[in-house]
Amino acid sequence: MSSNDYKLDEADRRILRALQQDGRITNQDLAAACNMSASSCFERVRRLRERGVIMGYTALINPKYAERELLVFVEIMLDRTTSDIFDQFAARIRRSPEVLECHMVAGGFDYLVKVRMKDMAAYRAFLADTLVVMPGVRETRTYAVMEEVKDTSILPL
C-alpha cells in the first residue's frame, strides 16, 4: 500500500484530533486520551509521521509579539501564464519570509498570497520593492484584514 492509499481508521483520527489540539502532549497522555496502550499509540504516531500524514510540529506565535499584526491577502495576476514564469515566480515567492502562504488558483487571477507585516507602511514597501518586481507580475490587488474572525490550522477529522 503506497502512502497515498493509506486510510485513517478511528484510532488514527483520535490521535490526530488530540495532536492538533496539543502537539506537545506526552505519548503517555496521548495514549490515555485515545484509550490505547502507550506502545500502540507510539507506533501509530510513528507510522503517521512516516506516511506523511503528520507533516511536522510547530509553535504558533502571536503575531503581535513578532511585530506582524497586519494581515494582508494579495491577488496576483501574471502577464504570461507559461511554465517558466510560474517556476520563476514560485521560486521567488518561496524565498520571501513575509509570505506565509501562496496558492495558484483558478479564476480571475493567478495567485492568492497571504502576508503578515508590521503595518501598512511596511506592506507598501514590500509591495513596491519585492512583490511587483517578481517575474511576470502584471497586476496586484490588496485586501488588508480589518478583523480576523477565525484563524485555525486544525483540520476536521
Image (spheres, grey):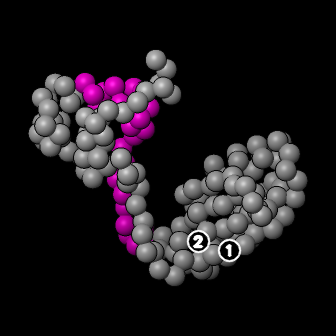
Is 60 included in the stretch rendered in magenta? yes
Please give the name of the residue rendered at 47% of the width and 80% of the height, measured from the top-left corner: 147
Task: Say which quarter of the image contains residue 45.
Answer: top left
Is 45 included in the stretch rendered in magenta? yes
Instruction: Please give the residue where the numbered disc 2 appears in the rendered image.
Output: 72
Asked whether, in this view, residue 146 is left or right of residue 10, the answer is right
Question: Mark 1 or mark 2, which is nearer the start of the sequence?
Answer: 2
| Disc 2 residue type (three-letter) | Val
Residue 142's disc number: 1
Please give the name of the residue rendered at 34% of the width and 25% of the height, measured from the top-left corner: 47
Up the image or down, 138 lies above or below 7; here it is below
Task: Say which quarter of the image contains residue 39.
Answer: top left
Residue 95's disc number: none
| Disc 1 residue type (three-letter) | Thr
Q: Does the residue at mark 2 contact the one at mark 1 (Cβ under 8 Å)?
A: yes
Q: Which residues are magenta?
A: 43-67
Crowd rating for badge 1 (residues with CA inside 10 Å; few <14, some 14–19, many 20+):
few
Element type at mark 1: strand
